[in-house]
């Protein structure tokens, strides 16, 4: 019985220690303790008011929720910055009356990532995603909110994966 208790204690200890180092998001923050998300300027030809603020907050929130890093306003170990380079609405399909049956909102963001702990992981890359909506609908209200949420979710997750995921 004594050996069974020791064996059980060993199994519990090994399981607890090995699971503690695992991250379900695949994030590899290394020695970094802090991160900084600088304000993303909106340099797109078509300007949507508040888009830059909403994207900056979405990226900061995603990193906060998927890592144990602390958000700081300066001197972060990991730094995200860039600009929104494209905000475009274009028709994707047409009807017999030469009107749009479906429109597509495309948002592109140029991101610069700096890792002060591992400078070889720095990059500058463009991320883009789109949202399709009914051609007779206006991009306002809940349609716009849904579009932004879906696009931001995809782009921020792509940025996270490119900078911290170790897949």
Image (cartoon, rainbow, N blue to C red):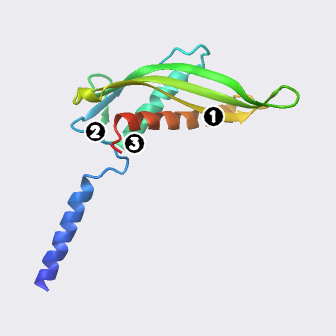
Q: Quadrant of residue 132?
A: top right
Dot 2: element: loop
Residue 163 vs 89, above or below: the answer is below
Name which of mark 2 and mark 3 comes first in the sequence.
2
Q: Quadrant of the N terminus?
A: bottom left
Q: Is residue 14 above or below residue 23?
A: below
Q: Which mark is residue 65?
A: 3
Residue 39 appears anywhere in the view: no
Pointer 2 or 1: first along the chain: 2
Q: Splitting the image into 4 quarters, where does residue 82 fall?
A: top left
Q: Nearer the viewer, mark 2 or mark 3?
A: 2
The x and y percentages for residue 74 are: 29, 22
Q: Can you name the residue that lies furthest to the bottom here? A: 1
Residue that appears at 56% across and 34% down: 151
In the image, what residue occupies the spot 52% across and 33% down? Answer: 152
Residue at 30%, 38% (x, y): give it: 69
Decide which of 49, 40 is in the foreground and name it.
Answer: 40
**Residue that label 2 marks:** 29
Q: Are marks 2 and 3 in contact (CB under 8 Å)?
A: no
Q: Which residue corresponds to mark 1?
A: 131
């Amino acid at each position: 019985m004594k050996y069974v208790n020791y064996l059980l204690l060993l199994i519990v200890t090994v399981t607890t220690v090995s699971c503690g180092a695992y991250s379900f998001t695949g994030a590899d923050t290394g020695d970094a303790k802090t991160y900084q998300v600088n304000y993303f300027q909106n340099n797109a030809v078509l300007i949507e008011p508040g888009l830059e603020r909403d994207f900056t907050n979405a990226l900061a929130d995603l990193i906060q929720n998927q890592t144990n890093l602390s958000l700081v306003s300066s001197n972060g170990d990991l730094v995200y910055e860039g600009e929104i380079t494209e905000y475009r609405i274009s028709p994707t399909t047409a009807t017999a009356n030469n009107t749009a049956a479906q429109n597509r909102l495309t948002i592109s963001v140029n991101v610069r990532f700096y890792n002060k702990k591992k400078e070889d992981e720095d990059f500058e890359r463009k991320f883009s995603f789109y949202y399709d909506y009914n051609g007779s609908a206006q991009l306002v209200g809940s349609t716009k909110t849904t579009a932004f949420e879906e696009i931001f979710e995809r782009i921020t997750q792509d940025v996270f994966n490119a900078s911290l995921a170790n897949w």
